[in-house]
Image (cartoon, rainbow, N blue to C red):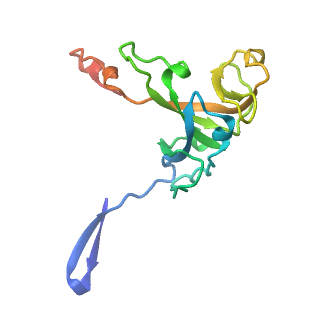
Amino acid sequence: MGLIITRHFLDQTFFVSLITMLEIHRKKKQLQVAGMYPGLTVSEFYGPSSDDAAETGQWTYDFSDPDGPQMGTVAFEGSPLVAATVDPVAVVCEHTSIGIPMPDILAEPVDVISLIDRSDKSFDERKFLVTSTGPDSEISIGAYTSKKDMPEGSEIVGRVIMVQIPWLPCMQKKKSGFMEDDALY
């Protein structure tokens, strides 16, 4: 789609591409990064503020505060899951620290980005939770089969909603020679 803009007094024509957002379109959500895990304290975890999700069909933007507590921002693809987070923050984790399996060929840990909703402090078995034993202690990320499996004296300070894993060359699918097998759907 495009729009032709004509400036009659100069007898010139200009073209600009336009994209009209659909009513159901969800834009990426910019989240502030709280820090790196392990080693992230609860105070650092709660430091960055979070904004409301953009209304469906709209978008948001951020003019970061250079004196603010966030370490940066990262975009998460727009989806109902991301839009439903009430108090989101991003935490950069090494894949080994939260138990994400990766190809054996990797020699070094891979940074992944966790979307965490700090407003969701309820317990659910086998869901990844963020826990802490106090405001100056480090957070812990883990999944538990029951509340009694959580670290002693800890409280839930958030829930991991999703984790973004980067695409790495070692994840490349081997060609089989059959188009049905080689196509990525």
Question: In the picture shown, does residue 105 fall above or below 86?
Answer: above
- Residue at far bottom of view: 9
Q: Is residue 181 left or right of residue 143?
A: left
Q: Position of residue 57 (x, y in %)?
A: 51, 54
Residue at screen point 73% across, 33% down: 121
Q: Which quadrant is the N terminus positioned in?
A: bottom left
Of 80 and 164, nearer the camera is: 164
Q: Which quadrant is the C terminus positioned in?
A: top left
Of 62 and 97, nearer the camera is: 97
Residue at screen point 50% across, 46% down: 73
Residue at screen point 30% across, 62% down: 2
Question: In the picture shown, does residue 27 fall above or below 91?
Answer: below
Q: Is residue 19 left or right of residue 59?
A: left
Q: Is residue 49 left or right of residue 113?
A: right
Of 56 and 45, nearer the camera is: 45
Badge count: 0
Question: In the picture shown, does residue 179 fall above or below 120?
Answer: above
Q: Is residue 3 left or right of residue 66?
A: left
Q: Position of residue 130 (x, y in %)?
A: 66, 29
Residue at screen point 73% across, 19% down: 151
Q: Position of residue 119 (x, y in %)?
A: 70, 40
- Residue 138, picture quadrant: top right
Question: In the picture shown, does residue 49 fall above or below 91?
Answer: below
Q: Position of residue 90 (x, y in %)?
A: 56, 39
